Image (tube, grey):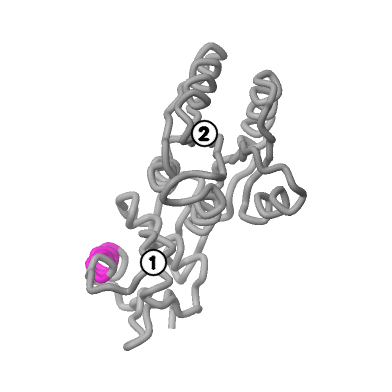
């Protein structure tokens, strides 16, 4: 099992990393929110220990974006913020558990093991638009039974669009949710990935599923 520890305080991060490794876990660390989001979204992490107060992106935002991208990775928030409002905010963003600093390391390990046991029995629902299928549990896609190879970013974009099939997603929304951009800017990264996805899921097919709504954004729909 591999755990991501997202904590910007080096002393605390080193303490947790050392302790978890002694318990037999593999451990990766992230010192800011953007790094944590990228590592967790890569799909090679079994659980996340996530601090709320971090540079670049706070833990609440990281958690919310992971859930928006379709990630079901168990998330334990570890923070000094102990008010009921803070805890409710953590759970509302998609966290599975919430532990307040200072904390007992034995309790941290016990809660992590419980989340990992629970997570192993939960399989996310497959997404379907027409004859296009996306399985979040295995991160695999097929169209009419033919496998489609996706990069991590292509998977994130396709999952977001398919999970909101029939609903138009603006360019700004997609940039914010998938890339974390908070501005419209002049970048054409979204358009480049839309072209790549179309080649993989629509090229040579009688029915196009990924459609452009001119002047607004994009939508996944069968007709």
Q: Give the SS element for disc 1.
A: loop
> Where residue 117 appears, x then y in whole percent?
66, 30
Above or below 16: residue 213 = below
Tell me if residue 211 comes above or below residue 161 in the rendering: below
**Which residue is painted at 73% across and 54% down in the image?**
85
Magenta stretch mostly in which secondary structure? helix
Residue 193 as seen in the image, left or right of residue 44: left
Rendered residue at 49%/23% (across/down)? 11
Q: Locate residue 193, reporting x and y percent.
A: 27, 64
Considering depth in this image, is 165 or 168 the residue closer to the camera? 168
- Residue picked out by circle 1: 182
At a point 29% along the width and 68% down the height, the residue shown is 190
Q: Badges 2 and 1: C-beta atoms under 8 Å apart?
A: no
Against 3, residue 41 (above or below) is: below
Residue placed most toward the observer, 185 or 152:
185
- Label 1 crowd bin: few (<14), some (14–19), many (20+), radius 10 Å: few
- The percent coordinates of residue 134 (x first, y second) are 45, 57
Q: Which residues are magenta?
A: 191-200
Which residue appears farthest toward the top when viewing the image? 22
Q: Residue at x 52, y 25 (%)?
A: 12
In what element is the residue under mark 2? Answer: loop
Label number found at residue 100? none
**Location of the C terminus (image quadrant):** bottom left
Q: Counting other residues with Cα less than 10 Å from the Cα at mark 2, is it few (<14), some (14-19), or many (20 or more)?
A: some
Residue 113 found in image quarter: top right
- Label 2: which residue? 46
* Image quadrant in which you'd find residue 50: top right
């Amino acid at each position: 099992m591999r755990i991501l520890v997202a904590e910007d305080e080096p002393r605390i991060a080193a303490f947790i990393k050392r302790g978890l490794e002694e318990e037999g876990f593999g451990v990766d660390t992230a010192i800011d929110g953007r790094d944590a989001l990228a590592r967790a979204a890569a799909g090679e992490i079994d659980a996340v220990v996530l601090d709320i107060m971090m540079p670049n992106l706070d833990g609440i935002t990281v958690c919310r974006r992971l859930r928006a991208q379709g990630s079901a990775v168990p998330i334990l928030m570890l923070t000094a913020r102990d008010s009921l409002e803070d805890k409710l905010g953590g759970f509302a963003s998609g966290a599975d558990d919430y532990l307040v600093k200072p904390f007992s390391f034995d309790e941290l390990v016990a809660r992590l093991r419980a989340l990992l046991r629970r997570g192993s029995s939960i399989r996310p629902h497959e997404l379907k638009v027409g004859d296009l299928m996306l399985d979040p549990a295995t991160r695999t896609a097929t169209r009419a039974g033919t496998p489609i190879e996706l990069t991590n970013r292509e998977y994130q974009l396709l999952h977001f669009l398919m999970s909101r099939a029939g609903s138009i997603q603006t360019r700004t929304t997609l940039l914010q949710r998938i890339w974390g951009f908070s501005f419209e800017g002049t970048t054409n990264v979204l358009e480049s990935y839309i072209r790549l996805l179309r080649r993989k899921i629509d090229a040579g097919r009688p029915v196009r599923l990924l459609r452009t709504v001119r002047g607004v954004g994009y939508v996944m729909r069968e007709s």
